[in-house]
Image (spheres, rainbow, N blue to C red):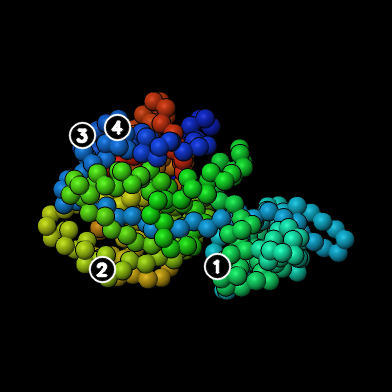
Amino acid sequence: MRTDVFDFDLPDDRIALHPAAPRDAARMLVVDPATGLTDAGVKDLPSWLRPGDALVFNDTRVIPAALEGERVRGDLRAHVAFNLTKRIDDSTWAAFARPAKRLQVGDRVHLGGTSELCFAAALDATVKAKGEAGEVELAFDFAGPTLDAAIAAQGQMPLPPYIALKRGADEGDRESYQTIYARHEGAVAAPTAGLHFTPGLMETLAGHGVSQHYVTLHVGAGTFLPVKAEDTAEHKMHAEWGEVSPETVDALAAVRARGGRIVAVGTTSLRLLESAAADGTLKPFKGDTAIFITPGYRFRVVDLLLTNFHLPRSTLFMLVSAFAGLETMQRAYAHAIATGYRFYSYGDASLLMRDRS
């Protein structure tokens, strides 16, 4: 498909720079291809679900993957910044560099302080490789858990560029850019639909008879990348690591057998579930997925999708258009923009019913 059909005008002030407080105070647009649009709030989610339905959450945990420091080349110094994107081995990470033109293979980068009392204050690395689009490989002096601790001490939360270009990350983002159920470290971007959940909302949903299940997909920085190709067939997705356990597969099979619906919390949960059902049946899954969902895709697992509002020409807007229908989502987004819904990671939510036509 031509990617320009997924374009729309999004006013700059519709991109949320801060989250709603409390988390579940965000608005929620209910989108039903059969009946239309309904304005609601995230707190209303239990009333839109049925006893016996199942919510599937992504329990990945975001690491503070945004690092700043100096490139050191002899006596020359230059400021550089990195967003770590994927661990390659115990001491090496792939990253996006800004500005990449300041870097050469073999350069040393200093990403911390100079305190001799704290190992994490001196996070140093060597540029091991460099690509053509700002991507680099950093070989750190530390490895394993020591490196993880150093990154945690020196890094900031990796806010999307649409936010980071307007404000820096602060200590509040360490909590607000993390779901309350985050467990397994490895993501460099948050599964943002899950940011709306509070302990109180989780308890209300459980009391309503909606079960809660977990998968893990370590969200990569590719979620921030725009689609530059003119046709979706020419776009290459970045792979992300995920796992669906046998226990979750069995639990969701039981939900389906009882007539319950599978509700994916976020596009990350949906993409992982659909990857695990590539042959038509949900099975345990552990490994990389680069699934790219566009209109025409036949969904095998997910019945409803809770997700935030996405950017023009993004793979995520293509995914929701496949799920609820392109014309339906174009109407939904036009309504959201006209009525002041907030977009992207810290923005409002939408609850999408699958297009059964």
Residue 254 visible (yes or no): yes
Disc on the earlier residue, 4 or 1: 4
| First along the sequence among labels 1 and 3 | 3
CB under 8 Å between callouts 4 and 1? Answer: no
Amino acid type at image mark 3 = Thr
- Check disc 4: other Cα within 10 Å, few if <14, some if 14-19, many if 20+: some
Q: Are marks 3 and 2 in contact (CB under 8 Å)?
A: no
What residue is shown with label 2? 247
Specify the label residue 35 is tagged with.
Answer: 3
Residue drawn 66% across and 63% down? 120
Residue 158 x, y percent position in the rendering: 56, 51
Q: Position of residue 176 (x, y in %)?
A: 47, 45
Q: Nearer the viewer, residue 277 or 139?
A: 139
Sequence-first disc among 4 and 2: 4
Residue at point 24% right, 46% down?
205
Q: Amino acid at mark 2?
A: Glu
What percent of the width, then of the height, locates residue 73? 82, 63
Give the residue number, with chain letter if any, for mark 4: 40
As measured in the structure, the alpha-carbon distance from the residue carrying label 4 to the one carrying label 3 is: 15 Å
Q: Residue furthest right?
A: 75
